Amino acid sequence: MKQAQEITGTLFNIMRFALHDGPGIRTTVFFKGCPLRCSWCHNPESLAPQPQILFQGERCLACGQCATVCPHGAIVLVNGVLITRRDLCAQCGACTLVCPAEARVRMGAAWGVAAVMAEVLKDRPFYEQSGGGITFSGGEPLQQPRFLEELLRACRRQGLHTAVDTCGHAPRAVVKRLAPWSDLWLFDLKILDAKKHRHYTGRDNRLILANLRYLLQSGQRVRVRLPLIPGVNDTAQEIDAIGAFLAASAPPEALHVLPYHNAGVEKYHRLHQHYQLSGSQPPAAAHIAEVVGRLQNYIDPVISGG
Ligand code: SF4
Ligand code: SF4
């Protein structure tokens, strides 16, 4: 039988000194792969479960080393400019190993439990001083449940506080199994209307709402996070529906309103992907305050920001 320490998962980043992913100073471990395709997602590199190559053209020195090593002939010179043929690229990563400017970066790598623990334990003094800990985010950490479970258990053995940041789209059996091992859930709630949810995220929301209700009603510590997206989920009617759903389920320990921002748009270009909400602007401060005030009719506290 495979030992816990041998279990591996795919991550795309480990970020130290995170201040908006739960209480205190935290290390956030980003899992790769997500079942949703939210139109406003600012981490497009997190969506596919497998590693991907990110090209940052502004860093390129045009040295040609990547073209020399590419075993698939996917990098070609066209009118003096190096072009990557997406149809030929096998995402092998050979070009990222020789690029002197980090213009080509491999997003995503296999990690073992022991390697992740060695990384997160570096900041134990900061967690202890600030009441912080480890947050598992993504992507969607529940997409790799065995890996996540082993990490949560390892953190518990080390006395580290844990949080799981989830979109909630996972089988109930997975949520139930992991619930006792996470000290806190950061649960994204986006849109209550099922049809609209499917339109903007690619998935129905019934499983998500049922999982959220399960966690709330089974006494787990849950902080709900509402991304406020102009023109998508910010009407008075939609905000009231979200407030009423939470109040009727069992109120979370806090509701965070996370205003839309478009900081991730450039990443879509680097991954040769289309950004669906181009042209959208962050909500005005007055509108955010109005939404927070409306939600306070149902939940306490309601907090603007992470
Ligand atoms: S990832 Fe591999 S196949 Fe793709 S361009 Fe780089 S070297 Fe070529
Ligand atoms: S190796 Fe890097 S810097 Fe050199 S041409 Fe390729 S992408 Fe540009």
Image: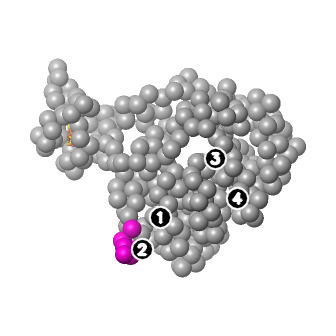
Asked which secondary structure carries label 3, the reply is: helix
Asked which secondary structure carries label 2, the reply is: helix
Q: Earlier in the sequence, mark 2 or mark 1?
A: 2
Q: State if disc 1 and disc 2 touch (CB < 8 Å).
A: no
Q: State if disc 1 and disc 4 touch (CB < 8 Å).
A: no
Residue 207's label in the rendered image is 3
Residue 215's label in the rendered image is 4
Residue 4's label in the rendered image is 2
Q: Which residue is mark 1?
A: 146
- Residue, x 59% and y 26% (percent of image)? 280
Q: Earlier in the sequence, mark 4 or mark 1?
A: 1
Q: State if disc 3 and disc 2 touch (CB < 8 Å).
A: no
Q: CA distance from mark 4 to mark 1?
A: 19 Å
Q: State if disc 2 and disc 4 touch (CB < 8 Å).
A: no
Q: What's under tag 4, amino acid-wise?
A: Leu
Magenta residues, start to end:
1-7
Question: Which residue occupies the extreme left position in the image?
Answer: 68
- Residue, x 22% and y 50% (percent of image)? 97
Relative to 102, residue 239 above or below: above
Question: Which residue occupies the extreme right position in the image?
Answer: 297
Does the stretch in magenta take in 213? no
Asked which secondary structure carries label 4, the reply is: helix
Q: Earlier in the sequence, mark 2 or mark 3?
A: 2
Q: Earlier in the sequence, mark 3 or mark 1?
A: 1
Residue 199 image offset from top left, x and y in percent: 59, 29
Crowding at mark 4 (Cα within 10 Å: few <14, some 14-19, many 20+): many
**Mark 3 or mark 1, whichever is nearer to me:** 3
- Residue, x 80% and y 51% (percent of image)? 249
Question: Which residue occupies the extreme top position in the image?
Answer: 79
Relative to 282, residue 222 above or below: below
